[in-house]
Amino acid sequence: MPETVSDQHAFRSTETVNDYVDWFNNVRISRNKNGLTPVEYREQAIVA
């Protein structure tokens, strides 16, 4: 666990960015990819 205020801020910032990247790739629906998330679209392209 972070020990200083600066470490805590860096930890929270990193956690926030990681959460956003996860949302962007796995939850967000893309209108130009037939309503699929980016991960679902890539998986579909690999299978095809």
Image (cartoon, rainbow, N blue to C red):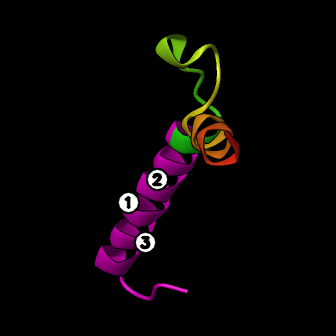
Label 2 neighbour load within 10 Å: few <14, some 14-19, many 20+? few
Task: Please say if the residues under marks 3 and 1 sit with CB atoms less than 8 Å apart.
Answer: yes
Q: Is residue 43 left or right of residue 7?
A: right
Mostly what secondary structure, the magenta segment? helix
In the image, what residue occupies the spot 56% across and 49% down?
22
Task: Calculate the distance from the C-alpha at mark 3 to the C-alpha at mark 2.
Answer: 9 Å
Residue to which mark 2 is pinned = 16
Disc number placed over residue 13 in the picture, else none: 1
Residue to which mark 3 is pinned = 11
Q: Secondary structure at mark 1?
A: helix
Name the quadrant containing residue 14. Answer: bottom left
Q: Secondary structure at mark 2?
A: helix
Q: Position of residue 7 (x, y in %)?
A: 35, 80
Magenta span contains residue 32: no
Farthest-out residue, left: 6
Magenta-drawn segment: 1-24
Q: Is residue 24 left or right of residue 48?
A: left
In the image, what residue occupies the spot 64% across and 15% down?
35
Q: Position of residue 2 (x, y in %)?
A: 47, 84
Disc number placed over residue 31 in the picture, else none: none
Q: Nearer the viewer, residue 27 or 16?
A: 27
Q: Nearer the viewer, residue 40 or 1?
A: 40
Q: Amino acid at mark 2?
A: Thr
Q: Amino acid at mark 3?
A: Phe
In the image, what residue occupies the spot 67% across and 38% down?
44
Task: Please say if the residues under marks 1 and 2 sit with CB atoms less than 8 Å apart.
Answer: yes
Q: Nearer the viewer, residue 23 or 7?
A: 23
Q: Nearer the viewer, residue 31 or 44?
A: 44
Task: Calculate the distance from the C-alpha at mark 3 to the C-alpha at mark 1.
Answer: 5 Å
In the image, what residue occupies the spot 60% across and 39% down?
45
